[in-house]
Image (cartoon, grey):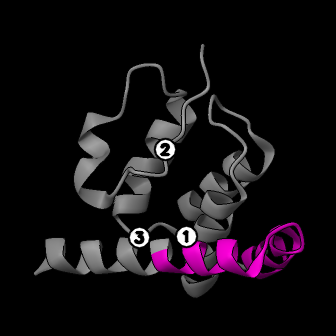
Amino acid sequence: MTPIGLASITPASTAAIPAATDSLVAVCLAAAQMGDASAYFDLGVAFSTGSHDVDCDFVEAHKWFNLAAVAGHDEATQCRADVAEDMTAREIAEAQRRAREWLRAGMRRAA
């Protein structure tokens, strides 16, 4: 399979996950729509390691680890800090923007 980037996937667009996406990532994205902290964490791991047919993307990894940390996942804070060591301030700001957007999109969907 060809690795794909999932940075543009939002809660509203996970229904259109490409068929080439690894099934674990697809399951995690669906669970993430429901606010599952473990799914956020697993997505952070996938993006930080470039596993499960996604490209290694520290911005996306930081975003998912950030969401997991906010949701109370025990390991997420340390993983987010580890990823941040290899990121610029601009990349961290982008990751935080994406996390806020994910949360806003989820709130709009819930309303």
Q: x, y (%) of residue 109?
A: 16, 71
Mark 3 and mark 1 residues within 8 Å of each other at the beta carbon:
yes
Closer to the chain start, of discs 3 and 2, is 2
Closer to the chain start, of discs 2 and 1, is 2
Q: Which residue is the site of mark 1?
A: 37
Q: Quadrant of residue 35?
A: bottom left
Q: Is residue 97 left or right of residue 83?
A: left
Q: x, y (%) of residue 58?
A: 72, 59
Q: x, y (%) of residue 28?
A: 50, 48
Residue that protrudes farthest toward the left in the picture: 111
> Amino acid under label 1?
Ala
The CA span between labels 3 and 2 is: 17 Å
Secondary structure at numbered mark 3? loop
Q: Which residue is the site of mark 3?
A: 35
State the residue at coordinates (59%, 66%). Answer: 64
Residue stretch in magenta: 76-97
Q: Quadrant of residue 17?
A: top left
Mark 2 and mark 1 residues within 8 Å of each other at the beta carbon:
no
Q: Is residue 9 above or below residue 40?
A: above
Q: Looking at the image, can residue 41 be seen?
A: no
Q: Nearer the viewer, residue 111 or 88?
A: 88
Secondary structure at numbered mark 1? helix
Q: Is residue 30 left or right of residue 52?
A: left
